[in-house]
Amino acid sequence: MSKTQQTVRLFMDDSPTPFAEYAPPVKIDLNTTRLVDGDHVMKVVARSSDGKDGVRFIPFTVRNGPSISVIGLDEGDTVSDIIPVTVSAYGSERTDSFVIEASETPKPIPFWVWAVLIGFVGWGAWYLISYLA
């Protein structure tokens, strides 16, 4: 009776064929540039020397493309009429020129900043009135 060799097979998403097969221990560099952005699952199937298989699923998210920011519409929003939506997409690629106008996502000033500013101005006005009186 011959023993089978130990193997580790790696599958990506629902692919029936492995993208790699090695003898353990395995150390690889996973190149995600060929995967689309989004959720993926790597399936690892390890076969022991006596022929038994062990399976492990490793979910992960790929984000190689540009970062996308949307202002004016959130997931699950109920909307009507006409709504303004701003979409910004910025990649991490290097360029020789730097465009300052497109380097930041235009977001409105948060409410808490306005509240702190109004409180500070109100305190300053109260202090000034009480000092002059």
Image (tube, grey):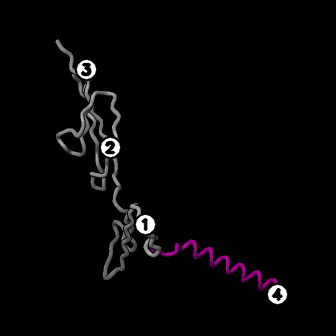
Q: Is residue 33 above or below residue 70?
A: above
Which range of residues does the magenta coloring cover?
104-131
Label 3 sits on a secondary structure element that is loop
Q: Callout 1 environment at 10 Å: few (<14), some (14 to 19), or many (20+)? A: few
Q: CA distance from mark 1 to mark 4?
A: 57 Å
Q: Residue at x 27, y 39 (%)?
A: 43
Return the mark for residue 49: 3
Return the mark for residue 132: 4
Return the mark for residue 30: 2
Label 2 sits on a secondary structure element that is loop
Residue 98 left/right relative to 133: left
Label 1 sits on a secondary structure element that is loop
Amino acid tagged 1: Asp
Residue at image mark 1: 96
**Nearer the N terminus, badge 4 or badge 2?**
2
**Residue reaching furthest top?**
1
Q: Is residue 84 above or below residue 103?
A: below
Q: Callout 2 environment at 10 Å: few (<14), some (14 to 19), or many (20+)? A: few
Q: CA distance from mark 4 to mark 2?
A: 70 Å
Amino acid tagged 3: Ser
Amino acid tagged 2: Leu
Q: Position of residue 4 (x, y in %)?
A: 21, 20
| Mark in front: 3 vs 4 | 3
| Mark in front: 4 vs 2 | 2
Q: Position of residue 24 (x, y in %)?
A: 31, 27
Q: Is residue 131 above or below residue 69?
A: below
Q: CA distance from mark 1 to mark 3?
A: 54 Å
Q: Position of residue 130 (x, y in %)?
A: 80, 83
